[in-house]
Amino acid sequence: MRSLFLFLLSFALLAGCSQRSDYAGEMAEQHADDTTDPTPIVQEPIFPVEARTVVYGELDGQALTGYYAEPARPDSVARALGLASADEMPALIVIHEWWGLNDNIEAMTRRLAGEGYRALAVDLYGGSVADAPEQAMALMRQATQDEASAVANLVAAYTYLRDEVGAPKIASIGWCFGGAMSLNTALALPEELDAAVIYYGRLTTDRDALATLSMPILGIFGADDQSIPVETVQAFESTLHELGKDVEVRIYDDAGHAFANPTGQNYVPEAAESAWNETTAFLRKHLYGVDEEEAM
């Protein structure tokens, strides 16, 4: 019953945020000139990976289909990273941008898997993928209008990674719309999720909601992002600090919304690479127990 209460609480709080403004419309302004053309900029995984389509649950009678990637030689990779076997390898819930589960997100999922994770990219658009801002706005608007289903989808992904894959630790990571949904995942699983990474996603600063969180959080934002004001990011960070939560926030100067997406017009290579390094260090610290700062 407590999990159900927390689920409904998180949905009510974040649905309220969406109703106060047109989130999808704001994203359309940020992505007005963007395309989803393939790019060679996304780097290959450090370790070779294998990827496949999987069914990770069911919602309203429909199968939930995602993109799953893991190291091609999991036991060897696990030992190289200090684990006894692949059974101890942690997992990631990877959440797509407003475009949907496209080639770019699949490439990022493989790259994350190459860092030593079992990575599952969820699909919150029911198989639809946008290649123009107008399509993305419509898909995102539909998903945010039924956030309860979106959160149930994410909880199903967590359950799949825990029960079917057997991952001992699980984190969420998402960009743009997916960044907001990474926070939603944390709010829906406040004690179960082991870490959350939010790339320029819509935030809540509601103290009661944030008080439920127990996992470490990394927030990545651009100082020039017109859709997520720096003041909101700072309020989010300060509220979590006041609550005694483990939170790290990075705000990159001269970077706007979606600065880490190499297929978009807002791509900032230096900031994107720095954010990637922050992200991988954060995940290693909280999922592998490797603190690179202490090691230095």
Image: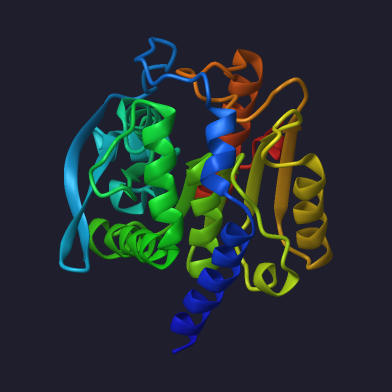
Q: Residue 77, relative to residue 94: is it above or below?
A: above
**Does residue 71 appear left or right of residue 244 in this picture?**
left
Q: Is residue 40 above or below residue 170?
A: above
Whether residue 211 is visible here, answered yes or no, is: yes
Residue 249 occupies which quadrant of the picture? top right
Quadrant showing the C terminus: top right
Taking depth in this image into account, of 254 and 137 the one nearest to the observer is 137
Please tell me which residue is depicted at 72% across the width and 46% down the height of the picture: 248
Give the percent coordinates (x, y) of residue 87.
29, 53
- Snapshot quadrant of residue 18: bottom right
| Residue drawn at 48 percent across, 60 percent down | 185
Task: Kindly tell me whether residue 284 is visible in this rendering.
Answer: no
Residue found farthest to the top: 40
Q: How is the image coloured?
A: rainbow
* 229 lies above or below 263: below
Please state if 240 lies on the left or on the right of 135 as rendered.
Answer: right
